[in-house]
Image: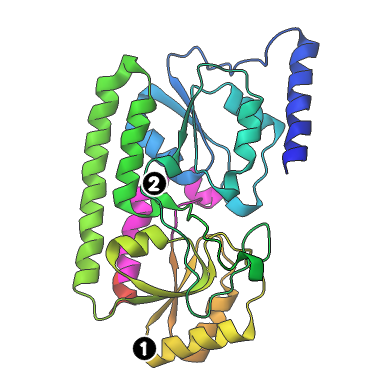
Amino acid sequence: MRKILCVLLSAVLAVSALSGCAVQKNPDADDGKLHVVTTIFAPYDFARQVGGDDVSVTMLLRPGCEVHAYEPTPKDIIAIRNADVFIYVGGESDAWVQTVLEGVDNPDLRVVTLMDCVELLHEETVEGMQAERHGHDHDEEDEDEEELDEHVWTSPRDAARVCRKLVAAADSAHAAAYAQRCGDYVEKLNQLDAEFHDVVEHAARKTVVFADRFPLRYFSDTYGLDYYAAYPGCADAAEPSAATVALLIDKVRAEGIPVVFTIELSNGKLADTICEATGAKKLEFATCHNVTAQAFANGATYLQLMERNVQALREALN
């Protein structure tokens, strides 16, 4: 990946040299707005909510695409170079970012790393979970290595922390407006947090089953949930082993779990298998890393997706 990025950066810089000037700025760069570039959906929406009409926000991950398959294009690198603020997650999935930033000649670029905004947790490999991680296989040498979980935005509490960091990285010209919008938005996130706590507090059970990756360690830790899942959050979702399928089916049957979850943009085949064997219902739980092209066009928001999660979780725990 690093070699590919070096080639991309060289191509971008070559275009600049041949044109006799720096890479051309976005034609809207002088519109008086703060230009923000984000890698994935959650910080894209946070920037929109906090920035309002004072910002222009671009998401690099195409709607409908899976984040683990993303590779930056020359156009993406130019977008980062021309930005006022660049927001990315950090961790293994964003290992390409450092290479890009090393080649970006923009001393005014402000960079926000989501993993620097919260208290980090390590990924867990729970009973029955296949531990092949994105980019490499899990073997005996990896058993003692703890990987930091990258999915920090999945807890509304941590989402609020991220939003406050975004205000600190924004331009001073609209500081009061950013602070006001951030305060209003954080209040909504706090209300969402209270809804999740209420669901869990009054639930008949505290265990969920994900026939999918589980990029929700921060969420489950915040609300005291136990879980079974097919893969860790950053795993390559290959064909599940027979042992994993059998264990998840046994857990659903033994505990009378009424819902089996998938995450967005998943094919849902494993969930279908488990539901057919147990009579459970398949539901989607949005992790907010991305949305479908249609949802994006319709103006989907983090709050909307998480409110649907409230209802889905209520059904799964009762």
Magenta residues (range): 286-313
Q: Residue at x 65, y 66 (%)?
A: 141
Quick one: 174 or 109, which is closer to the camera?
109
Label 1: which secondary element: helix
Q: Position of residue 73 (x, y in %)?
A: 70, 36
Which residue was labeled with disc 2? 301
- Mark number for residue 255? 1
Residue 23 can be seen in this image? yes
Q: Position of residue 34 (x, y in %)?
A: 43, 21
| Residue 304 sits above or below residue 43 on the image | below
Q: Within 10 Å of the Cα at label 1, are there few (<14), some (14-19), or many (20+) other Cα atoms?
A: few
Q: Hey, what amino acid is under mark 2?
A: Thr
Disc 2 to disc 1: CB gap under 8 Å: no
Q: Is residue 271 magenta?
A: no
Q: Hey, what amino acid is under mark 1?
A: Glu
Q: Position of residue 169 (x, y in %)?
A: 39, 26
Name the image quarter holding residue 162. top left
Q: Position of residue 257 (x, y in %)?
A: 37, 84
Specify the principal SS of the magenta part. helix
Q: Is residue 297 magenta?
A: yes
Name the image quarter holding residue 140. bottom right
Residue 62 can be seen in this image? no
